[in-house]
Amino acid sequence: MTLRGTASVAIILLLGLGGCATMRTGRDRIVKAAPRCVDQTVQIYFEAESAELTKEGRAVIAAAAAQSQPCKVASVDVLGLSDSVGAAGPNLELSKHRAQSVTTALAAAHLPAGEFKVQAAGQAGATNAEGQARPLRRRVDVVLHLSPA
């Protein structure tokens, strides 16, 4: 290889490596970008006839609160539900207790402050048009309305 060819290869390598450095900087900007604060929906499930949070439920709440930390929480919708087993009155009370358990746990998990809207639906909507019970209604649905802080 001639001196001129060697110089050309060196320039190409230098420019190529310079491009790698630029790419690394661009990647760093993407990786270090501020977190996106978009509304988040989580579901916390309960055992039958219980308003006590399970280990899994506490983990879901902790994760939702942690992901919300860099954001502003405008409001939190909490909706307690129950299945269609049993009478409507006790199921409504159970769904209220479930919603309150989740609300208390969210506050204890240091969720950034926001207005809580707590509701209970009991077994309303727990059956389909044919009268069959809908599965997985022993839960609380939580919607975190988030925006950048």
Image (cartoon, grey):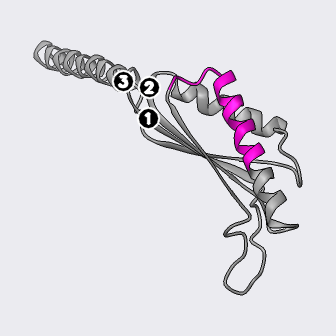
Q: Which amino acid does label 3 sit on?
A: Ala
Residue farthest toward the front in the current orientation of the protein = 89
- Furthest residue toward bottom: 130
Q: Which stretch did the figure color magenta?
A: 96-113
Location of residue 30 with respect to 85 vertically, above or below: above
Q: Mark 2 points at which residue?
A: 71
Q: Nearer the viewer, residue 57 or 77?
A: 77
**Between discs 2 and 3, the one toward the N terminus:** 3
Label 1 sits on a secondary structure element that is strand
Q: Main secondary structure of the magenta part?
A: helix
Q: Where is residue 118 in the image (x, y as percent from the top left)?
A: 60, 43
Among the two numbered marks 1 and 2 on one chain, the one whose residue lies closer to the N terminus: 2
Binning the other alpha carbons within 10 Å of mark 2 as few (below 14), some (14 to 19) or many (20 upward) gives many
Q: Which mark is residue 146?
A: 1
Q: Is residue 110 magenta?
A: yes
CB-based contact (under 8 Å), mark 1 and mark 3: no
**Res. 12 image quadrant:** top left
